[in-house]
Image: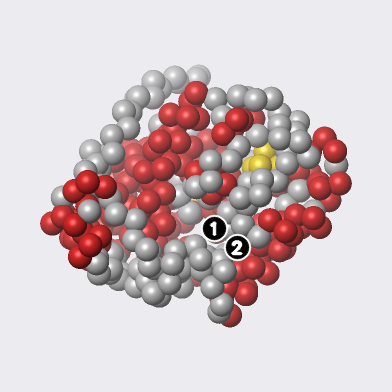
């Protein structure tokens, strides 16, 4: 029997955060807000901080450090090995959902052993980043519980790094994502390494549209394989009732060429355009909520478990 559930439509409303509220939000994340930044809060809404928890610009891939060198090597491997055929194979393999059966919260706890080598801003366990992002959004969007849960689960696909999920290499799990089957846009970080990707030799993949048509919709576009697409498949295959905007955020939150540089918008359809508004909102919190200030997991757990029960079955196939 098929049960059709009507998904609610959400109107995107950017929240205006007062100076007092802003300081509370940022300080809970472990940041000190410069006076001039706070002064602009009433006009600008959520403030995107300029510095991460280590005193450097967020997503600064040019800064000299051992970690930055490791990040560049990561993207070299990612850009060489992520091909259209590889992604097609991985989607077919993991769509079977035949590896593990567990709850969403059990998966959250597994992330304690995961560190993302592609992220120049964060050295803390991934579960802390999830909760920092979710709690920051919860303060500014208290009525959008689906968005709180989306923030909590958006990186759960990083369990692909663990042996029971295949123990995939970092370049196949984390990092920025991009389309395959069309030209690699110059906005993609460390773009120079694509010259070693076999797809670069395929004429069918090297035009603006490639194998796609303008306005075809991102659902019809092959995106580089990683934790985003895997968690999207997990949610879809297990019948999650998250709204389409939540699923869009999960699948495309690492698609920085789109939501930071505006590339590949010609492939979007109208639903993508509406959902992108929510992704822009989410991304500010995903990126700028990273800090050394840890969340009390047990304190917030009951709230998030209640959301999991609302939008997901008790046990999921992974």
- Residue at (81% x, 57% y) in the render: 196
The residue that mark 2 highlights is 161
What colouring does the structure picture have?
secondary structure
* SS type, badge 2: helix
Mark linked to residue 281: none
Residue occupying image coordinates x 57% and y 73%: 68
Q: Position of residue 225 (x, y in %)?
A: 65, 49
Residue situated in front as seen by the camera: 186 or 156: 186
Seen at 79% across and 44% down, the residue is 85
In this rendering, would 56 be left or right of 211?
A: left
Pinpoint residue 114: horizontal percent, then vertical percent.
51, 67
Q: Quadrant of residue 79?
A: bottom right
What is the spatial separation of the Cα atoms under label 1 and label 2, in whole angstroms?
Answer: 6 Å
User: The residue tagged with tag 1: helix, strand or loop?
Assistant: helix
Q: Which mark is residue 158?
A: 1
Residue drawn at x 57%, y 69% as measured from the top left = 62
Give yes or no for contact between labels 1 and 2 (Cβ–Cβ under 8 Å): yes
Residue pushed farthest bottom? 66
């Amino acid at each position: 029997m098929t049960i059709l559930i009507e998904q609610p439509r959400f109107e995107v409303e950017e929240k205006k955060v007062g100076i007092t509220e802003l300081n509370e939000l940022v300080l809970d994340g472990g940041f000190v807000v410069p006076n001039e930044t706070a002064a602009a809060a009433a006009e600008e809404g959520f403030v995107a901080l300029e510095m991460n928890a280590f005193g450097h610009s967020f997503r600064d891939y040019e800064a000299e450090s051992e970690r930055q060198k490791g990040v560049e090597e990561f993207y070299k491997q990612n850009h060489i090995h992520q091909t259209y055929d590889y992604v097609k194979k991985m989607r077919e393999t993991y769509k079977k959902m035949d590896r593990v059966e567990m709850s969403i919260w059990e998966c959250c706890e597994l992330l304690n052993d995961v560190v993302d080598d592609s992220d120049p801003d964060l050295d803390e366990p991934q579960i802390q980043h999830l909760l920092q992002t979710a709690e920051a959004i919860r303060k500014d969007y208290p009525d959008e519980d689906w968005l709180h849960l989306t923030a909590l689960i958006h990186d759960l696909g990083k369990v692909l790094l663990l042996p029971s999920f295949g123990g995939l290499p970092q370049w196949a799990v984390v990092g920025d994502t991009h389309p395959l089957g069309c030209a690699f846009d110059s906005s993609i970080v460390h773009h120079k390494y694509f010259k070693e990707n076999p797809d670069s030799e395929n004429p069918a993949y090297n035009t603006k549209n490639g194998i796609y048509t303008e306005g075809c919709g991102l659902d019809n576009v092959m995106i580089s394989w990683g934790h985003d697409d895997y968690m999207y498949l997990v949610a879809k295959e297990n019948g999650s009732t998250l709204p389409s905007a939540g699923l869009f955020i999960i699948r495309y939150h690492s698609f920085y060429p789109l939501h930071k540089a505006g590339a590949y918008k010609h492939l979007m359809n109208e639903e993508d355009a509406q959902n992108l508004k929510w992704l822009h909102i989410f991304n500010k919190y995903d990126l700028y909520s990273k800090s050394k200030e840890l969340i009390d997991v047990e304190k917030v757990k009951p709230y998030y478990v209640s959301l999991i029960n609302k939008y997901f079955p008790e046990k999921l196939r992974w």
